[in-house]
Amino acid sequence: MADTFLKSEAWALLRKKHILFIGDSNTRALYKDLLCLLCTGRLITQRENQAKGEPSFLNDQRIMFSGLRKTRDYVEDRIWREGRVTIEFSFTTRVFNRRIEERLTSNFYRQHPPDVVIINSTLWDLTRWGPDGYLAFKTNIVKLMELLKQSLPPSTLVIWLTALHPSSTHTSSALVVKDLDFIKKFLQYNVLEANFYAAGVVQKYGFNVLDIHYYTRLLCYRRRPDGVHYTCTAVRYMTNLILTHIALSWNMTLPGRTKSADVKVIQKALASQHNPKPGNTEQSESKNNRKILRARRRKLSIDDESAMSEVMAKSAHDLMREINWNEDLALQSLFGPEF
């Protein structure tokens, strides 16, 4: 479920906040689309979505760049500041590496920790790091969670995004090299298993999981021809998913353009946690229990009166015959039918 945010509502939600995106090209698309929403309110264009490594995008700064390449050591770090809102993006080809560790343990992040960390790295881990890439992924996801737990304050909202659904026939050449073309036939199943495992680890460490794989499972027709990336409308849908998740996590009011029973349940649960009803809950519970007991007693008394009237209506002969018949049944059940 995603509510629909406009420019002013996104600004109100992210005012004085520091957001950090860490991930692959799909995460970069979310970073760019959020900038489009905050700066102009429009959707990201296909050309902007496909571009990478440009010196500036909507007045952001490219602070580190390795040059355009399709290798595992590709580096692209960007930052955007405006109106006391800071949004950063760091490209990674592995869920845990030295660059991520150095960034999160730097003095700058110790003094100015991000308010929200949105992170995902799965596809590169499974396709570009050898036959044991999935084993390294299982180890590195634990290392990442340990790093986040130690380096970030409890107030930081960490959101793990599940990997999107890739195509089994057309996959980007940056992910699947020519000699390993057979991988794409079962990449979808590997992504499912990796998402399931990563979600369990992330939740174990007390962080949030936003399952965008689930929410986009029926949007395969909005995939681009490369089989990995998505169109601008699907990207905005995922951006709204993230903003909705942040608003619910911070107990902030949603725009209310989308009605959902799930959101109502979440909002009621949050309201009960943050705004409990006045009075002693134990007394209210005992009061409710007393009401239930009184209702049960009234029902029992009514049942007893109806049963007594039925007994009085019977003749003594009929009553004795019923008693003898019940005794015979009881004896036969104990000693057999020939008794």
Image (cartoon, grey):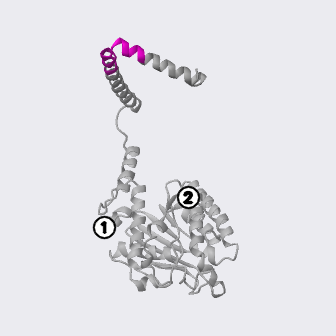
Alpha carbon separation for disc pair 1 and 2: 29 Å
Give the numbered dot on residue 152.
2
Q: Residue at x 38, y 53 (%)?
A: 251
Image side of residue 324 versus residue 135, left or right: left
Q: Nearer the viewer, residue 108 or 265?
A: 265
Q: Residue at x 69, y 77 (%)?
A: 130
Task: Indicate the quadrant where residue 302 lies.
Answer: top left
How many numbered marks appear? 2
- The reply to whether residue 15 is in sight is no
Q: Which quarter of the rendered picture does the C terminus lie within?
A: top right
1 and 2 marks in contact (CB < 8 Å): no
Q: Residue at x 33, y 56 (%)?
A: 253
Q: Read off the magenta span.
A: 306-321
Say above or below: 145 vs 180.
above
Q: Which quarter of the rendered picture does the N terminus lie within?
A: bottom left
What type is the residue that disc 2 sits on? Leu
Q: Is-magenta flag for residue 298?
A: no
